[in-house]
Amino acid sequence: MKTFSPQVRFGMPLSGNVDQTINPWAWSFASTGGQFGLINIDLGLSRAPEVEEDILARVGSYGRQIGRIGEALEVLLRIVETKCAPESLTPDEAKAIADFRETMCLIRAVKKENAAG
């Protein structure tokens, strides 16, 4: 007769493989990009990290790229609003546009504060 053997594994905290080598020299001189900082930000996995790094170096930061997209969308919104009736938008569409405009307004305010300071 075959006995029942569940495949559930239960363990308490610190009861399994929890060893970790702490080597600050390995952190500083790792071959994963050669970053030498106390705080390094990893924005996630990329299918082509070399291309992404090249774009950031030659085109601009994510903030600059998103800023340009936002500015272009504002131009497109002005064009669309002159040709379409705003009342033809659904409430969700109108809210999305209002939220976008508010975000762009806040971004401009932050830029202005930082330019003055």
Image (cartoon, grey):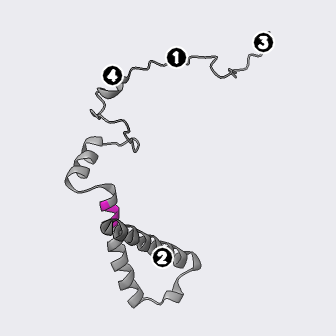
Taking 109 as reference, is 24 above or below it? above
Compute the Cα span from label 4 to label 3.
Answer: 51 Å
| Residue ID for mark 1 | 19
Q: Earlier in the sequence, mark 4 or mark 2?
A: 4
Single out the residue that lies furthest toward the top. 1
| Residue ID for mark 4 | 25
Name the mark nearer the viewer: 1 or 2.
1
**Mark sitting on residue 97:** 2
| Quarter location, residue 31 | top left
Q: Quadrant of the C terminus?
A: bottom left
Label 1 sits on what residue type?
Answer: Asp
x and y percentages locating residue 77 in the rendered image: 39, 80
Label 4 sits on what residue type?
Answer: Trp
> Which secondary structure class fits the magenta region best?
helix
Compute the Cα span from label 4 to label 2.
Answer: 50 Å
Label 3 sits on what residue type?
Answer: Thr
x and y percentages locating residue 67 in the rendered image: 33, 65
Q: How many marks?
A: 4
